[in-house]
Structure formats: structure tokens, C-alpha cells
Image (cartoon, rainbow, N blue to C red):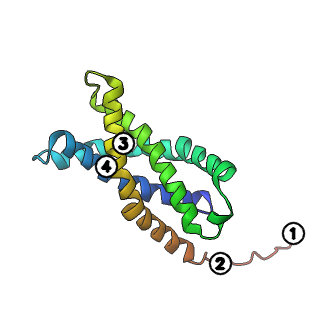
Amino acid sequence: MPRNFKEELLFTAVMAGLMVLVMAGYNIALADGFGHHFIREVLVGYPLALLVAAICDLGIIGPGVKYLFFHYIINDYMKKKQIRIALTISVMMVAGMVTLMSLFGMVVTQNFGGNVFLTYLHTWIFNLFMALPLQLLIVGPIARKILSLVQKVPAPERPLETETSKD
């Protein structure tokens, strides 16, 4: 778990960066297949999707999930192992992010179909089926490993400031 805002930014950058990249590729492959334009489409849409995902993560879903989790869900069983807390928060984050990013994808691609609700539900389910295992099995462990490596690096010591006499 990130311990400060700097670590939170790093963790979010890794997590959102990888999730958006893979999910963008997944959605483009579902919609258009793997044509000669596949990589270009992923790379063109990536910056905006990453920006929206980071805003949603840091400003909407992240704070909401943490509030719900630490006020209503956490229990003594979870407190025994940090991974239980991380996995529970990850599942909640995926559910929230899939909810918002599926809507974002529909708006950007103007994919509203005949019935907006059914199109959204279809998009949401397909994204959840991909995002949840991706997060729990691949991206989450990578992001947690990178964060743990950063947390293990000792902070550089500051030299003691010496008092100067003011005469």
C-alpha cells in the first residue's frame, strides 16, 4: 500500500498505465480485430484514456473505495494479512474503474448501438471479465512489486544544517 502521495502517484501511474494499455488493446481487438491499424489505434487513444483513468482513479474511484473499505468493510480477519486488504481494494477499484471507463469508451467511440443500456451492460461485462483477472494476476502484482522496491530504498540522508552566527 502506498504510504504517501508520491508513492500513490507512482502506484497509480504503473497501475493505470498498464491497465489502460492492455484494456485499450482488448477493446480495439474486440471491435475491429487485429488489423494493420491496431497498434496505431491503441497508441492514439492511449494518452486521453490514461488521463481520464488517472483522474478517475485519484479523484473519484480511489477515494470512494478507500472510504467505503476503511469505514465499512475492513475487519480483523483482513488485518491479519496485508494482501487481503490489497486484493479487496483491487476488486473494488476494478469494479469502479470498469464502470466509468466503459462509459468513457462508449462516449469516445460513439458506440451507443440500438439500446444504450444494453450496449453499456455488454461493454461493462466484457471489460470486467478482462480487467479483473488482468488486475489480480498480472498488473496488480507488478505494481505492488515496483512499489515495494521503491519503499525498500532508503531515503538519502540530509546533511545537518549548521547554525551560522549572525553578528
Element on which disc 3 rests = helix
Mark 1 or mark 4, whichever is nearer to me:
4
Res. 37 visible in picture: yes
Helix, strand or loop status at disc 2: loop
Amino acid beneath label 2: Glu
Which residue sits at x=35%, y=31%? 120
Instruction: From the image, tell me which residue sits under label 3.
Output: 49
Give the spatial CA distance, label 1 vs label 2: 27 Å
Residue that numbered label 1 is attached to: 166
Name which residue type carries label 1.
Lys
Instruction: Identify residue for label 4.
Output: 23
According to the picture, the residue beneath numbered tag 2 turns out to be 157
The answer to which of 131 and 17 lies nearer the viewer is: 131
Tell me: residue 11, above or below residue 54: below
Mark 3 vs 4, N-terminal side = 4
Q: Is residue 43 visible?
A: no
Contact check, label 2 and label 4, Cβ < 8 Å: no
Image quadrant of residue 152?
bottom right
Which x, y percent locates residue 128? 37, 46
